[in-house]
Structures are given as structure tokens and as C-alpha cells.
Image (spheres, rainbow, N blue to C red):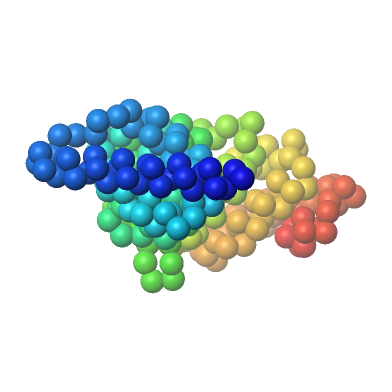
Amino acid sequence: GNNERVEHLVEGLVVALKQARQLREAQDGGGFQTSVWDFACAVQKLGKRPLGRHGPSFWDEVGSLVQEAAPSMTGREVAMFCNAYASGAPDRLSGSLGTALGDRAADLAEDLSAQDFTMILTGLSKASSSTEVPISKESLDRFASRARRLRLDPKYPSQAPMLLTAFARLRHSTDAELHGRLFRYAQSQWDTWDAQELAALLNAFAKMGRRARAGIPEEEWRSVAQRCAELLPNADVQSITLMS
């Protein structure tokens, strides 16, 4: 079946990656000998599949290459690896790997597209636990600074709630300026949103700290309630629950 073919492919990749790593170590470096972009695309596709018994070794070898290549990656490459790990091995982003990708993304933050920025923050946030955040406070502050000025893409209503959720997971949840800016962006767009999209936004806001929500005036929350009421007739049960 397909899963067996994927496992066989992963087995061969692990052997090839391990040999390449050992050769680089024997030569005291030597750099990444393939296209980082092509490798990132392959890892992202495999990250969505069950990898079988070779999965842990696969992520070990990928992590070694990613850390080596991270300082020279493009923003799109960082986004693809973060997305791959978020799908296949989010716990691997806690520690030095997440730090390497987070630091590189922070260096590139001013030039990241809204799509790549959202993919990176979402991926890194999935490695966050109750005791540990996978990126440095300095990098997180740079992400927040960029997010306050980021032009989101109206074609993707999920970006605002995904960013809110990511910052909450990364425990940056009391930034009234950031959350007010995302709220007002959503407010300018939600006439075109359906119930599920608005529910996702409100669910994300529910995870924010009280200080972050306090900067939004009561009359603006009333406008949310009005829009929810307009969408109720076509809303499913889950969306109604989240909106309420």
C-alpha cells in the first residue's frame, strides 16, 4: 500500500542522509549539498504521512541538516520546515532546532509575507509547552513588532485567528497593541466571513490575557455580537458554541 511505499522511501532517505552527514563530518563541514528548497518541500510532504519505524531517525537526520542550513535559509524555506515539523514532529521544535529556526525567522521578519509569517509562528507555537517556549524572548518580541505592522491577506481569513492562537501559545498574550490591531483588522473584514471563520477568531481571542482584551472598547464588542447574530441562522453547532 501507499504507507508501505512511504516507509520504504523514508528508510532509503535515512540511509542517504546519514551517509551525507558522516561525509560532512569527516570533511569538517562542506555545506549543504542539495537545494534547501527542494529538500524542504520533500520534508513537508512526508511530514503529513505516517513514517513508520524509521520516523524518529528521519527527523533526527532532517534536524541535523536544518540546523546546519538555518543561518542562510530564505523566509519561505524556514516557513516550509516549520510547517513540516508542526505536522509531523512538533515536539522536535523545542530546544536548539526551534531556536535556530526562530532566530533565522526573526532576522528575516521584516521581509516575510503574511503567509510565511503565519506558517512560522504557528509551527513554532505547536512546540510550546507549559514550561518552555521554543524561541528566545528577543525573537518573540521581534515577531510581535512585525505582527503589529503586518499586512494580512484578505483572501485568507484564518491568518488573524492563527496568529492570535500562536502568540497565546508562545505566552505573548498581554500585548494590547498587537491584539487590538488584529481585532480591528478582523473587524474590517468580517462582513465577508462566514460563521466558522468568525468563530475561529473569537475562540482565539478567548485565549488572550485579560489585559490584551481590555484595550478593545465595549461598543466594538457589541459590533461582534451583532455580526454573530447575523450569522447564526447558517452556523453549525460548533461555530455557535465558539461564538457564544
Q: Which part of the image, by quadrant, shows the N terminus? A: top right
Which residue is painted at 45% across and 41% down in the image?
9
Q: Whole-percent x and y of residue 208?
A: 55, 61
| Residue 29 placement, left or right of 14 | left
Q: Whole-percent x and y of residue 111?
A: 37, 30
Q: Whole-percent x and y of residue 183?
A: 60, 47
Q: Whole-percent x and y of residue 202?
A: 67, 55
- Number of on-image labels: 0
Which residue is painted at 43% across and 67% down in the image?
129
Q: Nearer the viewer, residue 204 or 87?
A: 87
Visible residue check, residue 3: yes
Q: Nearer the viewer, residue 63 or 185?
A: 63
The answer to which image quadrant residue 156 occupies is: top right
Visible residue check, residue 120: no
Q: Which part of the image, by quadrant, shows the C terminus? A: bottom right
Q: Nearer the viewer, residue 224 or 46?
A: 46
Above-or-below relation of 10 to 137: above
Residue ranking furthest to the bottom: 131
Q: Nearer the viewer, residue 128 or 68?
A: 68
Which residue is painted at 55% across and 66% down in the image?
210
| Residue 92 placement, left or right of 234 | left
Residue ranking furthest to the right: 233
| Residue 60 placement, left or right of 19 | right
| Residue 96 placement, left or right of 93 | left
